[in-house]
Amino acid sequence: MAKLTSGETNIDSYTIQGTENIIKVGDCVLIRPTDRRKPQYVACVEKFEKDSSNNVNVHVRLYYRPEEAAGGRREFHGANELFLSDHYDVQSADAIERKCVVHSINNYIRLQNPGANDFYCRFEYKVATGDFTPDSVAVYCKCEMPCNPDIFMMQCLKCQDWFHLACLGMTTEEADALDYFICPDCSSNTKEEVGENTLHNGNTQEPPQVPTMNPNLEKNEEMGGPENQAPDCSTQNSINNTEIPVSSAKRVMNVLNNMDCLESGSTLWCETLYLLEDPTRREIFLQMKDDASRLAWIKFRCNIEAK
């Protein structure tokens, strides 16, 4: 813990001016930016300090929005997704506007009515290196993309995987009209099984209703039962737990081969190939604006790897 200067004391909480809202250490808050054109900062309160003049400063750990991080916002990032960064800051407590909540992604999905003060986080983010923890998450559907809580999905009755309507070429109205859903890969086998059951039993049992998922999980809660739960978007105990799909190695090689500032076959070039075996780093590399930025990043990363 940092030492207090003369006249400073730690306090356990702070009441937002003009309100009765009390902010405590460990709470998440929205902080007013200096530039009003920018969105509010989301941060976790680490501690409060009060000086001899009763001015209160708040020490915070900042959350980053996807567009503020390396790689930018991608299709699977929800509107309220945040990354817990290693960026710490000190602000006047007067800049705190209100309390908010940063949920795990699974808890966020289960909210019936997420509000303006509800966010979720599934990654930690290192600002200096652009690294994410974890570096892989569960993926779903034919597109093999991580879960985006804002996008409606359906679960296959057979394989239990989840699918986007757009990837199935299906509208919301068509999905609502289904009694149950079986994905294209499972459909042929299911037809054979249904036919056999009909021959042996004379009739078939009515399949359960189609499990569906949207950000509010309204249909899931109506149906109930563990088989109708939303996809587990954590990195543990989740189906198809593979790395985030990234740009192909061919694209990386095309960029490298056209970098005049990096000699093909050189030691640094070979180190770069090794460095870019990591899919997240490949994506960061490809998202950079110019070769000068790529070269600076390569040298920085290679120096870190060498330590």
Image (cartoon, rainbow, N blue to C red):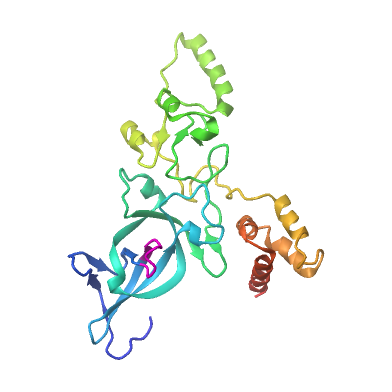
- Indicate whether 202 appears above or below 274: above
Query: Residue 207: where, in percent of width, then height?
Result: 42, 22
Image quarter of the N terminus: bottom left
Horizontal side of residue 106 vs 100, given as left or right: right
Answer whether residue 261 is magenta in the image. Answer: no
Q: In which quarter of the image is residue 23?
A: bottom left
In the image, the segment drawn in magenta is 33-43
From the viewer's side, name the closer residue of 236 and 28: 28
Horizontal side of residue 22 vs 154, given as left or right: left
From the viewer's side, name the closer residue of 291 and 111: 291
Residue in the picture at 42% in, 56% down: 121
- Indicate whether 140 appears above or below 104: above
Query: Residue 4: where, in percent of width, then height?
Result: 33, 86
Q: In which quarter of the image is residue 94?
A: bottom left
Query: Residue 62: where, in percent of width, then height?
Result: 41, 67
Horizontal side of residue 25 vs 155, given as left or right: left
- Indicate whether 138 appears above or below 265: above
From the viewer's side, name the closer residue of 143 and 106: 143
Answer whether residue 35 is magenta in the image. Answer: yes
Dominant SS of magenta comes to loop
Query: Residue 156: where, in percent of width, then height?
Result: 49, 31
Horizontal side of residue 166 vs 102, given as left or right: right
Image quarter of the C terminus: bottom right
